[in-house]
Amino acid sequence: MSNIKIAIFASGNGTNAEAIAKYFEKKDGVEITMIISNKKDAFVLERAKKMNIPAFVFSAKDFQNPEKVFKLLQDNKIDFVILAGFLLLLPDFIVDAYPCKIVNIHPALLPKYGGKGMYGMAVHDAVIANKEKESGITIHYVNKNYDEGQIIFQAKCLIEDNDTSEILASKVHELEYKYFPQIIEKTIKGKYH
Ligand code: GAR
C-alpha cells in the first residue's frame, strides 16, 4: 500500500508542524509530503527547510483559486490536510473535496473561545481575562465555519490564579505536542485500515 500523504498548513512559528513531522519520521506508511503557508516570513518555512520537507507559500487569494493550492494538493495526491496554527478559513471546494480528512487544532476547549480572530495568543488572553479555571486543546474536523467541525479529542489543563497568558500558552503547547501527532495517526488509521 502506498504511503498516506499529509499536507500541513501553518501560518506561524510551526512548533506543532515540526512535532508532527518528527513523529511521523519514525513511522511507516505516513509521510508529511509538504508544508503550505500563507505567510512568506513564517518561521514554519525555516523548520520545513531544516527537515527537508517541500514548502510552499500562497497568498490568501491563491487559497480561493482552484488552480493554485487545491491543484497542488490534487496533483500530489494528498490524502489528509492538517491545520497546525493556520489562520485562514478554507474555501468550500477544499472542504468538500476532503470530507473528514481535514483536521484542525484549537488552543482552547471549544465551543468556547473559538471563531474568527481567535488565534494563538488572542485565545489565551481571552481565557485569562475571563478568569477561567481550566483551558486545553480541541482537535476537530474542519467544516465550512471557523472552529465548528465535529470534535475528535479534547485535553484539559488547570489555570492557577497567577497564570499569565504566556504561562497558559506554554501549558497548552505541551498538550498539543503530546497529543496532536498521535490523534492524527489514530484518525488516519480509522479511515484507512
Ligand atoms: C497553536 O497553539 C495552535 O493551537 C493555534 O496556534 C498555535 C500555533 O503554534 N491555532 C489556533 O489558534 C487556530 N485557531 P505553532 O505555530 O507553534 O504550532
Image: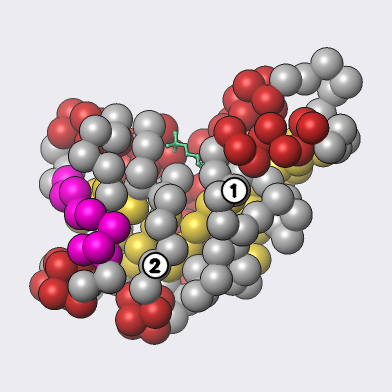
Q: Quadrant of the N terminus?
A: bottom left
Reading the image, the residue beneath label 1 is 118
Question: What kind of residue is marked 1?
Answer: Met
Q: Position of residue 64 (x, y in %)?
A: 28, 70
Under tag 1, what secondary structure? loop
Q: Residues within 10 Å of mark 2 (few under 14, many from 20)?
A: some
Position above or below: 115 against 39: below
What is the basis of the colouring in this image? secondary structure
Q: Residues within 10 Å of mark 1 (few under 14, many from 20)?
A: some
Q: Residue at x 59, y 62 (%)?
A: 147
Magenta span covers which residues? 55-63
In this image, 103 relative to 124: left or right?
A: left
Question: What kind of residue is marked 2?
Answer: Leu
Reading the image, the residue beneath label 2 is 90
Q: Position of residue 6 (x, y in %)?
A: 29, 60
Residue 177 makes an appearance in the image: yes
Query: How many circles with numbers are drawn on the protein?
Result: 2
